[in-house]
Structures are given as structure tokens and as C-alpha cells.
Image: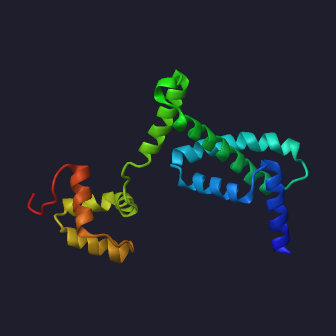
């Protein structure tokens, strides 16, 4: 029963987007590999597409229309990116150069190193870190406190590196 509904949904999506299931899968993989900023752009465009196709395909479920809108908006972005990448820079208009530059910039920004989840969580406990530092306690005591009372495992090295980065000085018990 569930498989029949899913198969009917796939058929409806294929009728709406007019591309094969394999091409849809390829586009969804493309979407998943994109940086967050480009995925947000795709999702904003998806919302517009959803409202356009909702009126045209009134009898189709909203979930099916939503997935179809995602495929259509991803396909539009994919085609735009491919066309920009195929052009020679000398033949591009100023607007095309700007679009290519913005696309490259978004992809580069998301490749920049980001903070680790442990570091982010350690920063949420920064008042405790500063309290231990002001009381002259060791990093090991801080680590043991965080493990036992906050159920947060963190290395001494991460604490020391983060302290140096945020406070601009080394952790020393002799200050």
C-alpha cells in the first residue's frame, strides 16, 4: 500500500518536472553537495516555484508539489551554473561575470574552515572557563569538572588553544 502511494507520487513528480527519475536523483545529489548559501538560494526559489505549480496542479498532494518544486529550482540553478561555467570569460557580459563571481564566492566561503562542534560547546561554558582561570585552577581540573558536572568531554589542548585564541594569552596558574 505504501509502495503504491510512493510510486504514484514519483509518477506525478515525473509528470510535473518532465525529467526522468535518474535525472531527478542526480539533481538532488547536486543539491546536497552545494554549500549552504546556495542551498538557501535554491530553497527561496523553490518557494516561488511551489506557488506557481500549486495552482496549475491543484489535485496533487502538497508534499509531491514541494518535492517537484525542489527539483525544478535545483535544475534551474544547475543549468544556470553549467551555462556560466561553459562560457569563455572574454565572451561574458558584465552580468554573467557578476553571477559567476557570486557563485564562486559562495562556494569558496563554505569551504573555509569552520569551528568544531566541541569548540562551539566549550564556548558556551566560557564563563566557567574564566572562573577556573581567575581562581588559578589548572586546565585539567576544568576538564574534569566539565566531564563530571556537564557531561562534556573535551581535551586539555582544545581548552588551551581556545583560551589563547579568545583571550589572547596563555593559560598560566602563576598570574
Residue at 16% x, 52% y: name it: 169
> Could you tell me which residue is drawn at 21 percent across and 68 percent down?
139
The furthest residue to the top = 94
Q: Quadrant of the C terminus?
A: bottom left
User: Foreground: 23 or 46?
Assistant: 23
User: Which residue sits furthest left?
Assistant: 174
Numbered circles on residues, count: 0
Asked whether residue 87 is in view, the answer is: yes
Residue at image coords 50%, 38%: 103
Q: x, y percentage for residue 161?
A: 23, 59
- Determine the residue located farthest toward the bottom in the rendered image: 148
Q: Residue at x 83, y 52 (%)?
A: 15
Residue 108 x %, y %: 42, 43
In the rendering, at what x and y percent does residue 106 appear?
Answer: 47, 41
The answer to which quarter of the image holds residue 173 is bottom left
Q: Nearer the viewer, residue 139 or 61?
A: 61
Identify whether 70 is placed above or below 149.
above
Nearer to us in this view, 131 or 15: 15
The image shows residue 127 at horizontal and vertical percentages of 32, 58
- Determine which quarter of the picture holds residue 22: bottom right
Position of 113 compared to 52: left or right? left
What colour scheme has been applied to the protein in the rendered image? rainbow
In the picture, the quarter occupied by the N terminus is: bottom right
| Residue 62 visible in this rendered orientation of the protein | no
Q: Is residue 25 left or right of residue 173?
A: right
Amino acid at each position: 500500500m505504501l509502495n503504491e502511494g510512493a510510486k504514484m507520487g514519483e509518477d506525478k513528480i515525473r509528470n510535473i518536472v518532465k525529467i526522468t527519475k535518474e535525472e531527478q536523483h542526480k539533481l538532488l545529489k547536486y543539491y546536497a553537495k552545494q554549500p549552504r548559501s546556495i542551498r538557501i538560494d535554491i530553497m527561496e526559489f523553490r518557494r516561488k516555484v511551489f506557488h506557481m505549480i500549486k495552482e496549475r496542479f491543484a489535485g496533487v498532494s502538497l508534499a509531491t508539489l514541494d518535492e517537484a518544486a525542489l527539483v525544478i529550482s535545483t535544475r534551474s540553478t544547475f543549468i544556470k551554473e553549467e551555462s556560466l561555467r561553459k562560457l569563455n570569460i572574454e565572451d561574458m557580459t558584465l552580468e554573467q561575470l557578476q553571477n559567476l563571481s557570486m557563485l564562486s564566492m559562495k562556494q569558496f566561503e563554505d569551504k573555509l574552515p569552520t569551528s568544531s562542534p566541541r569548540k562551539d560547546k566549550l564556548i558556551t561554558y566560557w564563563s566557567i572557563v574564566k572562573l577556573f582561570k581567575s581562581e588559578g585552577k589548572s586546565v585539567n581540573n576544568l576538564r574534569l569538572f566539565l566531564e563530571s558536572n556537564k557531561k562534556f568531554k573535551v581535551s586539555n589542548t582544545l581548552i588551551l588553544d581556545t583560551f589563547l585564541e579568545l583571550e589572547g594569552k596563555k593559560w598560566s596558574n602563576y598570574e
